[in-house]
Amino acid sequence: MTTFAQPRPWTGPHVAGELPGPLSAELLARQDRRESSARTYPRHLPIALAEGRGSFVKDVDGNVFIDFLMGAGVLSLGHNHPELVAAVHRQLDLLTHGLDFPTPVKDEFTAAQLAMLPGDLGRRMKAHFCGPTGANAVEAAIKLCKTATGRGEVVSFRGGFHGSTHAAMALSGLVAAKEPVRNTMPGVHFFPYCSPSRCPDGPVPGSCAWDCAGQLERALTDELGGIARPAAVLLELVQGEGGVVPARPEFVRRLRALTRALDVPLVVDEVQTGGGRTGTWFAFEQYGIEPDVVVASKALGGLGLPVALILYDARLDTWAPGAHIGTFRGNQLAFAAGTEAVRVVRRDGVLENVRRRGRQIDGLLAPLAGLPWVREVRGRGLMWGVELADAGGRPAGERAAEVQARALRGGLIVERGGRDDRVVRLLPPLNVTADVVEDACALLLRAVTECGPDRFVPPVSGRYRPGT
Ligand code: PMP
C-alpha cells in the first residue's frame, strides 16, 4: 500500500524534485494499468492528489501546488472550506440521500438558489433537480424545451461545450469526440458564436463584423432557411472549455430579442459560469437579459459534492411526473454544503472578491499581452485564459502544453482549453486571496515567458490569424 509523505507547511507552493514524484508515479502507473484510456487530467498534470486546503492541493509526495483548476471550477470556495465541511458533518448524521423527497436541507438549498436569482426571477422560475452532472442537466433542459414547444430542432454555437452524454455531446462543438460515436442526437444546428476575441468590431460600436446574430436571425426567419422553428437556443455566455471566450453583449441581447419574438426558449448553460464565477451569481446578469432556462451544476455544491439543476420559467413546466428522473437527484450532503456556500458567499462578499481579484489578474497578466507568442489574455471575474499564438514555427497548442508543464513544476496547477488546447486557463477559488493571486500570476508569467524567446521567429505576416 502507498504511504503518504509527511505533511509540509501550506504557506505557499513547494515542489521538490522531478514530477511526478515517486509516490505519484506509482499511483499513476497503477491507474494506467487499471483505468480507461479516456482519463484526461493526469495525462497533462502527472500528480496523484492527497489533500486539499483552500487554494492549495498537496500531492502524495508532499509537493504543494496553488490549485487554479479547482476541480474544473467545482470547488468554488476552495478545498475543504471549514464551514462547508462542518455543515456536511452535521448533515451526515441526519440523512445523506433523499431521492426527490422534500427535506429541510433541500428546501433551504432550493430557497437559497432561487433567492440568488435577480429581480423577480426567483418567483417566476421553478427548479428541477437532475442527475448530478452538468451534462444531465443540459439533457433535462433540452427535453423540457422539446416537451413544452412540441418541436425538435435545437440551435447551438460553435466552440461551445455542454457535456459528454449523447445529446450534450451532440450539442457541443468538439468534433473529435463525436467522430467515433455515430448517431448522437439529431436536429442540432450550429451557428457562429460572437465574441470580441474572435471577430473584429462591426460598424456599430459593440456589434460584430460577421453579424453572427443576423446569420441566425436570417436562418430562422427565412421561409427557405431550412430549419424548422427550434425547441431551444442553447448558449454559454462565456465559453469555458472553448477557451474562456465571452460572448459579445450585443450578440446576446439580439439572441434574446430574436428568441422572444419567435417564442423559442433561450437556455443558458451556466454549468461553469454559475455560482459566482464571473463576478455575478450567474453570468446572464451581466448581459441584461432574462433567459428562459438556466442550467447549473459544478459550483453549487460548494465542496465538489454533486448537484445539478435547471431553473426555468414556470410556463415551460409541461412535464409529466417522472419526465426526467434519476436516482442521484437528492444528495443531501451537497444541499447542506451548497446552502452553506451561499451563506458564506453573501456574508463574506465573495462576489466582490471575484471582481477585485479578476481586476488584479487582469493587471498582473497584462505584460503577457506584449509577447509575440501570446495572442490574447482575457477573462471575466475569476475565469481567465491566456491564448497562445502560433509563432516561430511552433504551434500554439504545443506551447500551451509546455506552459502548463512549467507552471506545474513551479507549483501552479492550470488547465488548458480552446481550439488545439492553446488557451491556458485559470479557475481560482472565488475566495482566493490577493497574495495567492500574486504568487500564481508570477508563476504563470514566468512559465509563459520561458516558453517563447529561444525558438521565436517573427511570423511572416506579422499578424496572427485565429483559425476559427
Ligand atoms: N456545460 C458546461 C458549460 C461545462 O463547462 C461542462 C463541464 N465542463 C458541462 C456542461 C458538463 O458538465 P459535467 O462534466 O458535470 O457533465
Image (cartoon, rainbow, N blue to C red):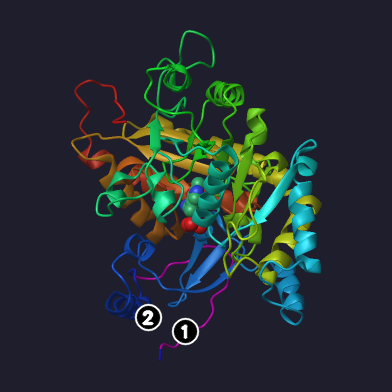
* Residues in magenta, as a range: 2-17
The kind of residue tagged 1 is Phe
Q: Residue at x 45, y 26 (%)?
A: 194
Q: Position of residue 270 (x, y in %)?
A: 58, 45
Q: Mark yes or no: residue 368 visible.
A: yes
Above or below residue 97? Residue 160 is above
Q: SS of the residue at dot 1?
A: loop
Q: Is residue 177 magenta?
A: no
Q: Which of marks 2 and 1 is nearer the N terminus?
A: 1
Q: For disc 2, does the CB lie below 8 Å from ligand 1? A: no
Q: Do the residues labelled 2 and 1 touch (CB within 8 Å)?
A: yes
Task: Quickly name the residue at label 2.
Answer: 23
The kind of residue tagged 2 is Leu
Q: In this view, does 189 lie to the left or right of 380?
A: left
Q: Which mark is residue 4?
A: 1
Which quadrant, please, contains the C terminus? top left
Above or below residue 290? Residue 30 is below
